[in-house]
Image (spheres, rainbow, N blue to C red):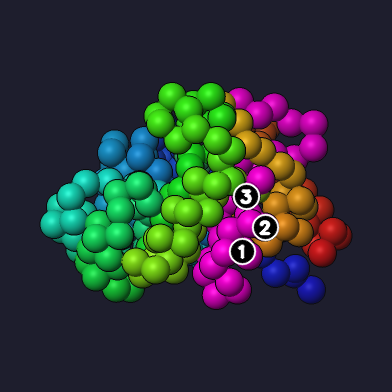
């Protein structure tokens, strides 16, 4: 029997559409979701969504991290809602009116609020005026975003248990900053293994380079999916 796909969104941070579609085809049997981010969307626009959809039975997570005044975000959310993304991201720091505008603009998508980027250290937070541990800011932003209508929250695996306690069981918790044991962290600062992130309450793990940078992205995705099944 074919095992069910793992709750992983593979970040397709590819330089071109053909590479993204190839990666999507290779990982499709093993994961539920692929994530289209800024690099790919700014280069190829809506075509990339169609191309990765053709590659397999996959949900498409549009990680555009919208951040602007409410009227502009509402228009942007309306514009991309015709692509039927399962998830669309906005920056939580845009505030409640902006988040509500995204929710109203894209009623078919889950609006996911990005709290504190997983690449940020405590020193980075202090530099932007958010002194203190990341967890306090993440919890506060998550609670505000959910009250404003977001049904998903993006945080690092370090804060996921605290966010779960804050927002309850019905909000989808998405964690980038996921690295298999022994792998490099690259520009990520607040990281944990896939097994740890899931055990602490994440619903969807965002994993990019550990899969797409592997010699065989399909085999890398299959190995992480198997490790998660074994741990669960
Ligand atoms: O806080 C955040 C929000 C989004 N991301 C995105 O996730 C992937 C991570 O890729 P890796 O190669 O596994 O580091 C990437 O597309 C980011 O834009 C994030 O990392 N942190």
Identify the mark at residue 164; answer none if there is no mark: 1
Towards the viewer: 181 or 22: 181
Residue 215: quarter of image: top right
Mark 1: give few (<14), some (14-19) or many (20+) Cα within 10 Å: many
Please provide percent x and percent y for residue 4.
70, 69
Q: Nearer the viewer, residue 139 or 203?
A: 139
Dot 3, how many residues are within 10 Å of its Cα: few (below 14), some (14-19), or many (20+)? many
Magenta extent = 158-186
Do the CB atoms of the residues marked 1 and 3 lie less than 8 Å apart? no
* Nearest the eye: 179 or 31: 179
What element does badge 3 sit on? loop
Could you tell me residue 191's position as x and y percent? 66, 38
Q: Are marks 2 and 3 in contact (CB under 8 Å)?
A: yes
Residue 188 pos. (x, y %):
58, 31
Q: Which mark is residue 159?
A: 3
Quadrant containing the C terminus is bottom right
- Mark 1–mark 3 Cα distance, whole angstroms, equals 9 Å
Q: Residue furthest right?
A: 230
| Res. 161 mark | 2
Residue 65 shown in magenta: no
Q: In the image, is 4 to the left or to the right of 103?
A: right
Q: Quadrant of residue 186?
A: top right
Q: Residue at x 58, y 51 (%)?
A: 175
Give the residue drawn at x 48%, y 39%: 117
């Amino acid at each position: 029997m074919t095992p069910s796909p793992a709750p992983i969104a593979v970040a397709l941070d590819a330089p071109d559409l053909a590479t993204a579609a190839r990666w999507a085809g290779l990982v499709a049997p093993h994961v539920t979701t692929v994530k289209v981010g800024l690099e790919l969307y700014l280069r190829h626009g809506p075509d990339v969504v169609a191309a990765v959809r053709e590659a397999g039975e996959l949900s498409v997570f549009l990680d555009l991290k919208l951040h602007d005044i409410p009227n502009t975000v509402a228009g942007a959310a309306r514009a991309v809602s015709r692509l039927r993304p399962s998830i669309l991201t906005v920056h939580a720091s845009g505030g409640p009116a902006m988040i509500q505008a995204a929710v109203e603009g894209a009623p078919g998508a889950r609006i996911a609020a990005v709290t504190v980027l997983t690449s940020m250290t405590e020193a980075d937070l202090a530099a932007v005026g958010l002194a203190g541990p990341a967890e306090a800011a993440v919890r506060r932003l998550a609670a505000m975003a959910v009250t404003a209508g977001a049904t998903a929250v993006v945080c690092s695996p370090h804060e996921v248990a605290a966010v779960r306690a804050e927002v309850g069981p019905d909000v989808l918790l998405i964690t980038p900053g996921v690295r298999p044991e022994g792998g490099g962290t690259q520009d990520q600062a607040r990281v944990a293994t896939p097994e740890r992130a899931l055990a602490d309450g994440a619903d969807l793990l965002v994993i990019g380079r550990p899969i797409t940078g592997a010699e065989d992205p399909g085999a890398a995705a299959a190995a992480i999916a198997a490790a998660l099944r074994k741990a669960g």
